[in-house]
């Protein structure tokens, strides 16, 4: 109802203002649309595509740039890929994305040995809430890759 009453006059005012001030429309940047369109064409879930690209040699940092997402998102995709029974290939430099010291990594490793890899909260508590969930996800995935 409001659109019918106010929509056209409002749009006319905007057009007039833009013409008066010589403003042109800025097209939206196409960030991330290439990867999204690829997954739609292929018909695969994003975590499957990420897992396959990781196994084909792409690093986590390469994947963050390609899909324009954060490291945590790629780690989540790889964990989901692995959780579905898919094999992830181990890479020696995997922990380069971690910000933890070697002592903190070792403590997290021991906590995962005690509490398992299913739930992160027991690990977070065992480490006295000093290691972020993002870092715990990285360590968990690293441990799963070694199995």
Image (spheres, rainbow, N blue to C red):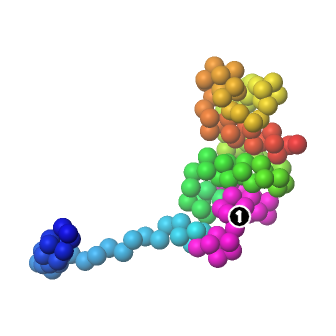
Residue 64 is covered by the magenta coloring: no
Between residues 59 and 78, which one lies in front from this camera angle?
A: 78
Q: Residue at x 82, y 55 (%)?
A: 86
Q: Which residues are magenta?
A: 37-61
Is residue 55 toward the left or the right of residue 8 in the image?
right
Q: Residue at x 60, y 32 (%)?
A: 132
Is residue 74 toward the left or the right of residue 2 in the image?
right
Q: Residue at x 69, y 58 (%)?
A: 47
Is residue 72 toward the left or the right of residue 15 in the image?
right
* Placement of 33 over or under 98, stated as above or below: below
Between residues 114 and 69, which one lies in front from this camera angle?
A: 114
Q: Residue at x 62, y 72 (%)?
A: 40
Residue holding disc 1: 49
Q: Examine the rendering and report whether any part of residue 34 can be seen.
A: yes
Toward which corner of the image does residue 116 lie, by quadrant?
A: top right
Q: Residues within 10 Å of mark 1 (few under 14, many from 20)?
A: some
């Amino acid at each position: 109802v409001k659109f019918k009453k106010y929509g056209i006059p409002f749009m006319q005012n905007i057009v007039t203002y833009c013409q008066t001030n010589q403003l042109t429309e800025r097209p939206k940047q196409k960030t991330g649309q290439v990867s999204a369109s690829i997954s739609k064409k292929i018909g695969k879930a994003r975590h499957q595509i990420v897992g396959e690209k990781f196994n084909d040699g792409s690093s986590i940092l390469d994947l963050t740039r390609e899909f324009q997402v954060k490291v945590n998102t790629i780690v989540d995709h790889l964990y989901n890929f692995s959780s579905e029974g898919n094999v992830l290939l181990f890479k020696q430099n995997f922990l380069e994305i971690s910000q933890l010291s070697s002592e903190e990594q070792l403590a997290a490793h021991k906590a995962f040995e005690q509490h398992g890899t299913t739930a992160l909260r027991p690990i977070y508590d065992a480490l006295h809430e000093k290691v972020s969930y993002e870092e715990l996800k990285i360590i968990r995935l690293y441990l799963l890759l070694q199995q």
